[in-house]
Image (cartoon, grey):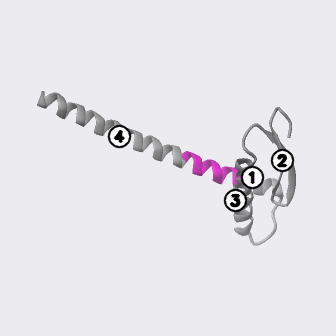
Amino acid sequence: MSEDGNQIKITIFGQEYSVKAPADPTYIKKIAEYVDSKMREVQAGFSSTQSSNRIAILSAMNITDELFNARKKGDSEEIDVEEKITSLIELIDDSV
């Protein structure tokens, strides 16, 4: 391992990569495993073998969709919390 970050080997969709990052190697491996599983999931949806590039792009789009939906859900929950806080503040103000 170097001082600039951890260098580890990961395998995604049958290809080995050497990754150097400041993050924990276990975390990087979990990310690689997730990407690998998403790529295999996309490939399984086709009746014939697709190019790795096509699988990677479709997987990236699926992962981005998950991210956007998670952010949207987080934003919605944040709005709900803000509304509840505002209601509580109004109740407190009314009782004073």
User: Of the residues under marks 3 and 1, which one precedes in the sequence?
Assistant: 1
Image coordinates of residue 13 in percent, x first then y, are 81, 59
Classify mark 4: helix, strand or loop.
helix
Image coordinates of residue 79 in percent, x first then y, are 38, 39
Image coordinates of residue 40 in percent, x first then y, are 74, 64
User: Of the residues under marks 4 and 3, which one precedes in the sequence?
Assistant: 3
* Dominant secondary structure of the residues highlighted in magenta in the image: helix
Question: Is 29 left, or right, of 92 in this rendering?
Answer: right
Image coordinates of residue 68 in percent, x first then y, are 56, 45
What residue is disc 3 on?
38
Q: Amino acid at mark 1?
A: Lys
Residue at (78%, 39%) from the top-left corner?
21
Residue range highlighted in magenta = 59-68
Question: Is 80 left, or right, of 16 in this rendering?
Answer: left
Q: Amino acid at mark 3?
A: Lys
Residue 8 is labelled as 2
Find the distance from the CA under tag 4 to the CA under tag 2.
Answer: 41 Å
Task: Kindly report which numbered mark, 1 or 4, lies closer to the viewer in this rendering.
Answer: 1
Classify mark 3: helix, strand or loop.
helix
Quarter location, residue 16? bottom right
| Near-viewer residue (77 or 60) | 77
Q: Label 2 near label 1: C-beta < 8 Å?
A: yes
Q: Label 2 near label 4: C-beta < 8 Å?
A: no
Task: Kindly report which numbered mark, 2 or 3, lies closer to the viewer in this rendering.
Answer: 2
Residue 81 is labelled as 4
What residue is disc 1 on?
29
Find the distance from the CA under tag 1 to the CA under tag 4.
Answer: 35 Å
